[in-house]
Image (cartoon, rainbow, N blue to C red):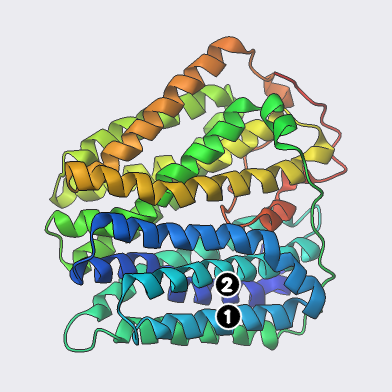
Amino acid sequence: MLASIRPVQSLLLAIFVMMAGSGFLSTLIGLRLERAGSGTMVIGLVATAYFAGLVIGALRAGKVVRRVGHIRAFAAFVALLSASTLTYALVRHPVPWGALRLIDGVCVAGVFVCLESWLGDRAEAGTRGTILASYMVALYSGQAVGQLLLRSGGGVAPHVPFEIASILISLAILPVCLTRSAAPTFAQAASLPLRRLFAASPLGVAGAGITGLLLGAFYGLAAIYARRLGLSLAETATFMTVVIVGGVALQWPLGRLSDRYDRRRVIVSGFALTLGVSIALATEPTGVLLLALGFAFGGLSFALYPLSVAHANDRLLPSERVTASGQLVLLYSAGAALGPIGAAAAMTRAGAGGLFLFIALAAGAMLVFSVWRLAATDAVPGEAQRDFQILPRTTPTAALLDPAGDPDDSQHQVTT
């Protein structure tokens, strides 16, 4: 394994450091807006601006990379993200913060496009799975570690978390700029009509979009939920970290289960359990029960996106899988942009628990749709199912890392 990732270790270090710096900003900004007296809808709109920036960046960053190259584009995106992060300490109003979150989203997407296309170029058929797994570990580990930086936000120096975040983001430039690995030529998957994708896998398409709705709502407003339960800043950081750790811990076991049995039934079970856990969290539990439910929520909800992609891949031609995975990322991102608005409206009417009532409603709607698809179509034969892969929900470029999209795969298409 170490030999497989050695050629890309500088890229993995860069994503870990950058996520440690930027991964907790959504949590921090939500908390700061609430402390400044902003309403829940305002906080939700600011969160939506970030996810909208991710969509814009995912669609546009490739042109920048093609024009100036990977290293220069990466340095430009990181520098702008670092500057944006420092600006939060200078202005304290939701309107400019919303604009800054939009910029953050564009920059983070640009970083993902640079690194993921570079990793995809360096990955070979025998190492693609290892590199993908290592990338996911680096990304989520950095995000989990970053949550702990929330603890630095108290006292008489409220600007310190933004400064620490900016320092870490700036340091992410070094591994990439000093790497001896030659930057590749930027490659991008061809487009696939959404109508064709939905016709092949309605469950995969709907699952990706609804999962974005769930997790966009969670990332945008979970910290507000925790604080309104009476958790301290340190306890809020612990809650967010536990959810992310749960998301990493349970993805692989659920994925392996979906390889052995009808994947649709695992998806149905996943949404059903997410519905149950969300209802439990909506009752506003505290203490160990809150952390246990948070761990379960992360483990279940984080697995729903890669399960949906795997199901879609089961029903597509080999030549369509990379492009389809890219389209599903955009659907996830569009859902994530809408999630904070819906959750904010629910919290305005129902209090803190409204966040998970909204998530439960979305999961319940998807559960009904999933059960209908289960009854309406036949299962993909076990020998025709693709192996499950843990996939990042970042940009369409990440699809180039998916081993299921290897063009030499002779797997036939299974239609609905």
Check disc 2 and report its element: helix, strand or loop.
helix
The answer to whether residue 294 is above or below residue 239 is above
Q: Is residue 256 above or below residue 118?
A: above
Q: Separation of disc 2 and disc 1 at Cα?
A: 7 Å
Q: Residue at x 37, y 51 (%)?
A: 340
Provide the residue designation for mark 2: 107
**Is residue 91 in sight in this rendering?**
yes
**Quarter of the image holding residue 364?**
top left
Q: Quadrant of residue 245?
A: bottom left
Q: Are marks 2 and 1 in contact (CB under 8 Å)?
A: yes
Q: Residue at x 79, y 52 (%)?
A: 189
Left or right: where 156 falls relative to 11: left
Image x and y of residue 70, in percent: 74, 76
Image quadrant containing the C terminus: top right
Q: Is 10 or 356 nearer to us in this picture? A: 356
Per the rendering, the mark at residue 28 is none
Which residue shows up at 67% across the image and 22% down it?
382
Per the image, label 1 sits on a secondary structure element best described as helix
* Amino acid tagged 2: Cys
Earlier sequence position, callout 2 versus callout 1: 1
The residue at which mark 1 appears reads as: 78
Residue 16: image x %, image y %?
52, 72
Q: Position of residue 139 (x, y in %)?
A: 53, 64
